[in-house]
Image (cartoon, rainbow, N blue to C red):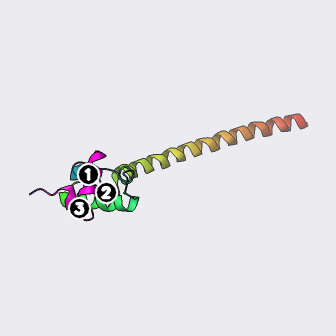
Amino acid sequence: MKPAIIDIPGIGPATEATLDGHGFRTLRTLASTSVGKLASVPGFSAARAGKVIAAASELLGPGTGNKDEQGNNKKDNKAKDDGKENKRKKGKKDKKDKKGKKDKKGKKGKKGKK
């Protein structure tokens, strides 16, 4: 028999109904969701969501879910990486702009003093 959501430790009939009402009808949907999405379901904290996602992935077997080697959600990591990369690029650009503006102001100031 295939494992079901109710086979996850700590998930009973009432919690299964709550998850079903929020679109989590299969172990695969649970295993592939993010902690943030599952934590938005009433009765789920980020810690509980992480445990349920891990348990769903384990019940499905190896190679399922949306986790990387460290057990972190791949979608969350990608969003974090993209944010860091964009901030770095923007930061470098801003520094160049500020430096350029300072140089221009400095030159104007020197010409006016002579």
- Which numbered dot is residue 3? none
- Relative height, residue 84 to residue 103 (above, below): below
Q: Are marks 2 and 1 in contact (CB under 8 Å)?
A: no
Is any atom of residue 17 visible in this view?
Answer: yes
Give the answer, above or below, for where 109 lies relative to 5.
above
Image point 74% across, 40% down: which residue? 103
Q: Secondary structure at mark 2?
A: loop
Q: Residue at x 79, y 40 (%)?
A: 106
SS state under label 3:
loop
Q: Amino acid at mark 2?
A: Asp
> Which badge, 2 or 1, is on the more N-terminal residue?
1
Q: Can you identify the residue that label 3 sits on? A: 8
> Could you tell me residue 31's position as x and y percent?
26, 54
The residue under label 2 is 68
Q: CA distance from mark 3 to mark 2?
A: 21 Å
First in sequence, mark 3 or 2: give its number: 3
Residue 1 relative to residue 83: left or right: left
Specify the quadrant that holds the N terminus. bottom left
Examine the rendering and report whether any part of residue 62 can be seen: no
Q: Is residue 10 magenta?
A: yes
Quadrant of residue 95 within the rendered picture: top right
Of callouts 1 and 3, the N-terminal one: 3
Tag 3: amino acid:
Ile
Q: Give, as a three-letter code, the residue at label 1.
A: Ala
Residue hosting label 1:
17
Query: Where does the magenta region start and end?
Result: 2-25
